[in-house]
Amino acid sequence: MPPDLDHYEIYYADKLWNLLPAVYRTEDTDIYSANGPLREMVNRIGAQAAIVRRSIDRLWEDQSIESCDDWVISYIGDLLATNLVASLDARGQRLDVANTIYYRRRKGTVAILEEIAYDITGWQARAVEFFRRLSRTRHSLDSAINVPGDTAADNATLQIAQGLAGAWTNSMIGGWADLRNAYGASQAQSPNIISTAVQSPSAFDEYFHTADVRAGKGRSGWYNISKLGVFLWRLQSFGVNQSTPVQYGNCYTFDPTGRQIPLFAASTRPLGDTWVSPQEWQLPSPISTPLFKACLANPQTIELYDAIEPDGVTLRSNSLGIFTKPGSFYELIDVSQITAFPELPNTSPQIMIFPETGIFETLQPIGAAITVHYQYGFSAPMGAGPYDRRIIGQTITSNPLPIVNVSGGGNAIKLLGSVQGVGTLSINDSLTYNAILDISNIQQLTVTAQNQTRPVIRLAPLPQGGVKEWILTGVNDGNLTLEGLFFSGGDIVLRGSFNTVTLTCCTFDPGTAAEQAVPEDESVSSPPLIFAQSLDGRDLIPTHLWIEGEVIQLNIDRCILGPVRTRKGGEVETLTMTNSIVQAISTQAPNSPTQSPSAPDQPDLTLSFTTGLTNLSRCTLLGASHLHKLEGSECIFDDVMVVENSQNGCVRFSAWSMGSVIPRQYQSVEVPGKAPLFTSREFGRPGFAQLLENVDNNILSGDPNATISAGAVDGSEMGAFASLKNPIKESSLLIKYQEYMPLGLNPVLIHVT
C-alpha cells in the first residue's frame, strides 16, 4: 500500500502526542494553526514508527523474491549465493535471484549460456563451441559420417544436430567445403581476419578451420579447443506496421523518407524450456538476399515474410510484408508472388525485393495503394519509432482536452481546416502525411503520435526553391509538447512566447550528406552535390528547429534532430537535452578548410544560442556548435564547440574536439575534429552514432585511464547511448559466466551488430 494511503504517520504521531502530559502540549505553542517544536519532533518520531509498522506488515511478503521490497533482494540473493551484477536494475536483479536454481540445474549447457546472455544484457545471443569448428584428422573412435543426403533421414538429422555436417552446405566435419549452397557459403569466416571487414561476424559458419592460438578478441582467436564464442546482436529490431513506401516509377522503398536502408529480421528466438539454438532469421540482424531466397523457397520454416493463419483472417506478422488496400481493409500480397534477384525462370511473381537496400519493384501492375510492414535496426528506442515510449516508474501525464484524432495519411491533417491552440492533436497510424497546418495562439497544445506508431510528416519541396516551414506560435507563455513525430522535408519554426516546449521521442530529419564521387574526366567540373537524394529524387535536407520567439524552457529527450538554432532575435533561457543526437550536414565544398564556429549565425551548426544556459546530458553532437553557457555531462562533441562564457559551467565525463573553447573539463578526453568514432554518421543506417570498438584509439589527451567506450560516470560509454550501459553489461556477463561456463572453456564475446 502506498504510504499516503495507510495514514500511519498521522496515526502514530497523534497516538504519541496524546500520551504526553497536557501541560507540555499546552505550552508547546500559542498559535492554533501551527505546530510547535515539540509537536514537530513527535511528528518525526511518528513517521519513523510508521516505517517500522510497514516493515512489520510486509514481513510475510519479504520472504518471497516475487513480492519482497527492492532492498530485500540482495539479502535473499546472499542466501542463495547469487552473484548479483551491476548492470541489472532492481527488476533485473529480482529475476536473476528468482532464476538462480533454474540456471544451476542447466549449468554448463549452451542453452543456459545463451539465456543468461539475454537476461543480463537484453541482447540476443548465440553460443558456438569453437572446438566443433576445428578441422582435424578423425580417429577410429569417431563415429562414421557420410554425406547426409546419402543416409537415412533420421541419421542425417542426427549428424546435423551433432555438428558433424552442415545443415545448409552438407559439409562433413573435417571434409572439403561445399560451396554450392549460396546462403551457407555466405556465412564463411576466415580465422585470419584481423582488420575491419565488410561482412559482419557470422555465428552460422558451417565450415571447419585450422587452430588459432591468439587471444580471443574481436575477429581473432576464435578456433581453438578452449574457446566458446558468444555472438551478440546489440542492435534492436523495430517493426513498423502499415507504413507508406516512397514510389518512383515501379520501384519503392520500405523507408518512408525514400532512403535505401537494410531490412532487419524480427527477434523471434525461443528461450526457456522450448529453447533451440536460434537461426539467423530469428535474430535482429540484416536480411541478406541468400537468406531471403531461402525463405521464399521454404516460407513455412523460415518465417520472414508475413503470412495468413489457417483461419484465412488472422495475420501472422513476421519481419516484412507488402499490402494493398483495394477497399476498406488491407490485403497481404502472398509470398508466392514475391521473388528476389535474380528472378527464377518460368515464374511470374508480382514483387521483387532487394533486402540489403530496402527496395522492392513491382513486376506486374498492382492496381491499388501499397503499404508495407518492415523492421529496421537501431541501437536504442530513440527518436520517432514504433516502440513503447512510456518509462517504468514515470508518471504518465494526461493530454489536454479536447483530443482530435487523425489517421489515413496524405493530407488528412490539412483537411482539419485548423488546429486549436488548446488541446491535443493525436496521429493514430504510421502512414505518411504530406501536408501540415500552421498553429497559432498556442496556450496548452500537444501534438503526439499514438503510442507504438511512427507517423511521418514528409513535406514536398517548394516549386520555386526554398524550404517549407511549419510555424507554431505561442501566446501568454504557452506550453507546447511534440511527441513521437517524424518530420522530414521542411523546417519547424517557433514564434511568440512559450513557457515550456517539450520534445520527446521525436525525429527531425537531420538529412544525409551526398557521397562525393571522383569524376572519371577531371577536366569536366560540375558542382558537388551537398545532400543525398531519396528514391523519388528529393534532396534529403536537414530539418532545422528555428526559435524566433521567446522560450523559457526547451526540453528535449530521446530525440534525433537536425540543427537547433535561434534567429531573428529568438531566445531560449534554458535548453535541457538528454539522451539525444543532433547532427548538422556540412554545406561546404569538399576539402575546404574547417571554419571555427566563432559567430552564432555561421551555417552548419548543430546548436547555436547567443543567450541562456545549455544543459546537455548523454548527448552526441555531430557538427560544430556555438553556445553562450554550457553544462555538459557524458557527451560527445564530434566537432569544434565555442562557448562564449567559458568561465562558468563544466564539461565532465565527455569527449570534446580539438580547437574547442569550452568550460573547465573533468574526467574528459580530447579527440580530433570529425574523428572516426562511429560505425556510421549517416542517419538511417543501423549503426548511426554507434561507437566503434576501437574508438579509444582516437584520444589525443585527457585524464589518465580516461576512455570514451567506458568513460561515463557509471562506467558506461559516452554519448547518446550511455543509458544503455553496454560496457557494464559485457563485464557483468563475463562475471556471470565465471559460474556457469563449461569446465575448461573461455568465453569470447563477439559483436555481430
Image: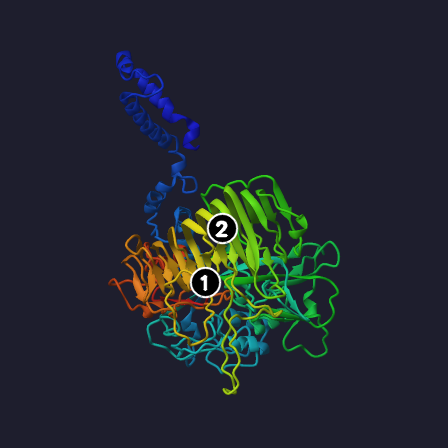
- Disc 1 crowd rating (10 Å Cα; few below 14, some 14-19, many 20+) is many
Instruction: Report x, y in % for residue 219.
Output: 40, 73
The tag earlier along the polypeptide, 2 or 1, is: 2
Q: Residue at x 45, y 60 (%)?
A: 582
Is 394 in front, or is 122?
Answer: 394
Q: Disc 1 on helix, strand or loop?
A: strand
Q: To which quarter of the image does residue 580 belong?
A: bottom left
Instruction: Report x, y in % for residue 137.
Output: 42, 81
Which quarter of the rendering shows the N terminus?
top left
Number of numbered discs present?
A: 2
What mark, if any, has residue 751 been given in the picture? none
Is 295 in front, or is 60?
Answer: 295
The residue indicated by pointer 2 is 504
Q: Residue at x 65, y 55 (%)?
A: 409
Q: How is the image coloured?
A: rainbow
The residue indicated by pointer 1 is 583
Residue lying farthest to the front in this orientation: 568
